[in-house]
Amino acid sequence: MWVVVVLSRYVRELEIYSSCYQDKQNILPSSLYTCKSLVILKLNGGILMDVPRMVCLPSLKTLVLKGVNYFKQESLQRLLSNCPVLEDLVVNLCHHDNMGKFIVIVPSLQRLSLYIGYKRVLDEFVIDTPSLEYFKLVDRNYDSHPCLIENMPKLTEAYVDVRSTDLQSLIGSITSVKRLIISSKAMFGDGYIFNRLERLTLHVLEENPSNLLSQFLKDSPNLQELEYFSELDDSYENMRMFPWNQPSIVPECLLSSLQKFTWSQYLGRTQDRDIAVYILKNACCLRNATIDSYTCLVPELKMIKELTRSSRASTTCELNFS
């Protein structure tokens, strides 16, 4: 009844939070799905989306769905297909929802954020968003999902945090980005070029971190800023050491474009030192390099001596420690 009342007053922004632990889920009134004034809709928690056949949300620009359930498999797609000016979509898929296929085909969409919980396995997800400028994917599930992600020619910024071992189907759809934050232990194959990528933040996990760095350096000829972030967990003292397989040919970005390099939580292992020295030795345009050590593991004086004594391709590079 509360929702019916606010809809009758031509509400523009509506946010509903309902506990996920209640015995009976709330079903929203059908008038919600034909509200002409609604611009922002946020639903969170124990809500069952029973989307009727008659749907029309002509003004809706922002839709946030966190932990809701869907009455039928096609409920979300039916809703999205009747939001002609939708620009911003946030969906959190939790283990208790009943969606097998996640399908987003929205020509007007500019921002998409998708969170998949660690217990959540999808049959597949399909994303076709030709106007998308920002894409965020956080997938905590270690099982890979069959996915078709395509048609993102305008993508400018992406945040990717995936735990599965499959990056192939994803990486090809985000090669147009200018700014990329990525956290993954997976590799992707050859044939992908990030011609527009200017700023890369690479969160390295335990397996093959240096190989993923080599891949991005090779495939990003115009990279200007690189932040290399060593992610630590409770077992960091026993982190496995992988050799630094430096590129056989110095990447184009090191020769002509990289200006800023930051290493956060530098661990000081032999591999880490070799990577840092390689970049300092070959980055001809580097203006600033900052090494932020994990001080409880790395003797600061030893680290400073090792890196300050290494040769630098750029005579104007300022080397900082923190």
Image (spheres, rainbow, N blue to C red):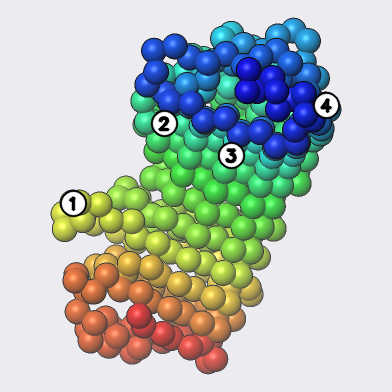
Q: Earlier in the sequence, mark 3 or mark 4?
A: 4
The structure residue drawn at horizontal position 78% and vertical position 19%, both measured from the top left corner, is: 34
Nearer to me, 276 or 30: 30
Mark 1 and mark 3 lie on one chain; the one further toward the N terminus is: 3
Q: Secondary structure at mark 3?
A: strand
Labelled pair 1, 2 in contact (Cβ < 8 Å): no
**Mark seen at residue 113:** 3
Foreground mark, 4 or 2, reads 4
Q: CA distance from mark 2 to mark 3?
A: 13 Å
**Helix, strand or loop under label 1:** loop
Question: Is residue 77 visible to the viewer in this orientation of the structure?
Answer: no
**Who comes first in sequence, dot 4 or dot 2?**
4
Q: Quadrant of the C terminus?
A: bottom left
Please state which of residues 198 and 118 is positioned toward the viewer in this rendering: 118
**Whole-number angstrom distance, CA of label 1 to CA of label 4:** 54 Å
User: Who's the residue at 40% across and 70% down the image?
Assistant: 263
Residue 261 horizontal/vertical position (percent): 49, 73
**Front residue (pair 47, 125):** 47
On-image quarter of the N terminus: top right
Q: Which mark is residue 117?
A: 2
Mark 1 and mark 2: Cα distance apart in space: 23 Å
Among the two numbered marks 1 and 2 on one chain, the one whose residue lies closer to the N terminus: 2
Asked if the residue under mark 4 is in contact with the one under mark 3, i.e. CB atoms within 8 Å, the reply is: no
Between the C-alphas of marks 4 and 2, the distance is 33 Å
* Residue at image coords 77%, 29%: 9
Residue lying at 27% horizontally and 88% vertically, measured from the top left: 305
Kindly state the secondary structure of the residue where label 2 is placed: loop
Three-letter amino acid code at disc 1?
A: Ser
Q: Which mark is residue 235?
A: 1
Which of pointers 1 and 4 lies earlier in the amino acid sequence?
Answer: 4
Q: Which mark is residue 36?
A: 4
Residue type at the position of mark 4: Lys
